[in-house]
Amino acid sequence: MPDPTLPDVQMNLVRPKEPVIGRLVGSESCMKGRSASFVRHVDIDVSGTPLEGNFRAGQAFGVVPPGCTAQGKPHSVRLYSIASPSWGEDGEGKVLSTTVKRVIDERDTDDAQVHDLFLGVCSNWLCDIALDAEVPVTGPSGKRFLLPERPNDHNYVFVATGTGIAPFRGMVKELLEHPDGPCTSQIHLALGVPYGTDLMYDDLFTTLAQSHDNFHYHTAISRPETGKRRYVDRVIVESEAITALLANERTLLYICGLKGMEDGIYRHLLEQGIVDQYLNWPDDIPREPSNVSERKVRAGARCMVEVY
Ligand code: A2P
């Protein structure tokens, strides 16, 4: 089975120094319930800008929040994953979407006396603004975290933590809601979140799983009220169906979310004897589970990784 062919994509049509103006046309909570965190699905109309029709599921775009830093410099661009299929929310590539989690935290400093509330500038601005507000946008960026050119040639294992779900919303919609008919390959999506109420797009994925026999939706809750804490890599390790699918040479593995989430998955690939299908493991690194976190083991052509 040859390596997947990825499509040619447009990159950096709009540079961070000269953003163009999009407009907010949708903003709604995409969480299953009320939670300590807030995540919104945000739609931005980019029609008439170079971004129109020129982005793909899995790419990112930039947002430049208005205003200046405490040092008086204009805010820098922030990157957000596109949560839409390549044809956008409107079917014509005019409206793209993303998944924005409000960054709310106590400031973490070396000084125990400094622990005031920190609000992420761009995420909170994007979640606060009203419909029709102007949104300075840039991009698109990213040329590897993409669906292959011939989707039906492959199976898919998508693994996300938190808002790492964004690109998979777009990709799953692209595969299953394609105008030429749904992809018939096996598709597994696994999402890990702290609480059950944090699940994002849960209705969409549940409905798609009910209507497509080839789509399987799994969740892992890390801080359940009762029962065992579970990280998303356990879904992969414990599922016989996913493990068998990973052994299939047509399968592609996509990982998006917190840095470190890939380690448990890589160890599982090693234990299953299929690590070379997905990773480039240098000859001078012993093939031991502890070495996956050495950062010397790199994703290969069938493994797409976005961790931060
Ligand atoms: P926890 O924070 O309970 O340790 P969010 O981005 O909304 O915080 O969600 C990220 C999810 O990923 C949380 O459930 C978090 O668990 C979990 N998580 C943290 N570290 C890892 C890891 N190394 N592998 C897999 N999941 C992780």
Image: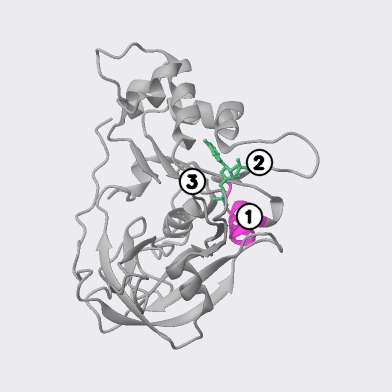
Percent position of residue 235, x then y = 59, 34
Q: In the drawing, does residue 290 fall left or right of residue 115?
A: left
Q: Amino acid at mark 1?
A: Leu
Label 2 near label 1: C-beta < 8 Å? no
Task: Pick the quarter of the image with the N terminus.
Answer: top left
Q: Is residue 217 above or below residue 45?
A: above
Rendered residue at 25%/68% (across/down): 54
Q: Amino acid at mark 2?
A: Ser
Which numbered tag is attached to residue 222?
2
Q: Which mark is residue 110?
A: 3
- Residue 165 is covered by the magenta coloring: no
Asked if disc 2 is less than 8 Å from ligand 1, the answer is yes
What residue lies at 53% left-to-right and 32% top-to-bottom?
242
The earlier-in-sequence mark between 1 and 2 is 1
Taking the spot 27% from the left edge, 50% from the top edge, the residue there is 149
Q: Which residue is mark 1?
A: 199
Magenta residues span 198-213
Q: What residue appears at the point 37 percent right and 33 percent down from the top-left corner?
A: 250
- Mark 1 or 3, which is nearer the eye? 3
Mark 1 residue element: loop
Picture quadrant where residue 67 is located: bottom left
Near-viewer residue (262 or 175): 262
